[in-house]
Image (cartoon, rainbow, N blue to C red):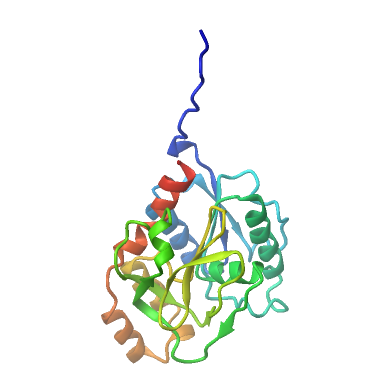
Amino acid sequence: MSVTNTPHKREKSQLKTLLLQIRDSPQVREEELQSFAALSGLDVSQIDVLNVFDTPVFPETAADNYDALWVGGASEANVLKPEEFSFIEPSLKLIQHCADTDLPVFASCFGFQLAVLALGGEILHKDADFEMGSLPVLLTPQAAEDPLFHDITGDFLAISVHRQYAAVLPSRCQLLAYTDQCMHSFRVDGRDFWAFQFHPEVDRDTLVERLTFYKAHYTDGDGQLDRVLSSARETPVANALPRRFVDRVLLA
């Protein structure tokens, strides 16, 4: 009699992931790590941190021994200024390597912009009238077949605060979500690689805390800050995406 061995399903507690973090402030470093952990359903101990302000030079293979790479946002860096921020080039090589080797990637905001550049796309800049707050995001028809988006119907609210943006999809990618201003999510064709211009890992309370911290960077004073924060809404659909990535991709 022959016996067929069925692979055991991976347990969530066995996962080990890496966060490529682009944060200089100790307060925001810790808040971002806690947010990724809470909304992904992972324990903080399951997320190692590679902070580029501490370690600006690192190999493209830095994530090879992990189950996935998270890439966070940034407010103290500009993806369009590699001459000023030496960690941008190693970050691009790491992200390109992950795409080439099909290491699962979940990239948010600055991570989205890095992914666009790493995949051969273009990032543009706005000095004024850029997206800031909880905004409605629209889905493309392709989202209906996507592992993370397929059961989301209609538009949904997401936290978005960014001066840099992408207007054209990189090659070999599928657009999944957008706003009137720019692209907001894509998947690399045939890869477990998703990028989001909005912040799936940021909820309303975190937006209030973070935007208050960075108000000098994004607002023209307390009046504009108060208007943005007073209009902020909860974003449960967007905030479910990190856990979907874990459950539907890493544990599939």
Which of the 4 image quadrants contains residue 55? Answer: bottom right
Question: Which residue is rendered at x = 64% and y = 54% of the image?
Answer: 98
Q: Tell me if I can see residue 23 in this picture.
A: no
Q: Say if 241 sits above or below 129 in the image.
A: above
Q: Say if 101 sits above or below 123 in the image.
A: above
Q: Out of 202 and 144, give the one closest to the viewer.
A: 144
Q: Out of 123 and 42, give the one closest to the viewer.
A: 123
Q: Out of 90 and 144, give the one closest to the viewer.
A: 144
Q: Quadrant of the C terminus?
A: top left
Q: Out of 88 and 105, give the one closest to the viewer.
A: 105
Q: Tell me if I can see residue 244 in this picture.
A: yes
Question: Which residue is rendered at x = 39% and y = 65% of the image?
Answer: 202
Q: Say if 118 sits above or below 242 in the image.
A: below
Q: Residue 65's x, y, as percent?
A: 63, 43
Question: Which residue is rendered at x = 45% and y = 86% of the image?
Answer: 130
Question: Which residue is rendered at x = 37% and y = 57% of the image?
Answer: 150
Q: Residue 87's x, y, as percent?
A: 68, 68
Which of the 4 image quadrants contains residue 115? Answer: bottom right
Count every numbered label the image shows and give the total: 0
Q: Residue 103's x, y, as percent?
A: 60, 50
Say whether residue 167 is left or right of residue 232.
Answer: right
Q: Residue 85's x, y, as percent?
A: 68, 74
Please, which residue is most extreme toward the top here? 1
Say whether residue 67 is left or right of residue 226.
Answer: right
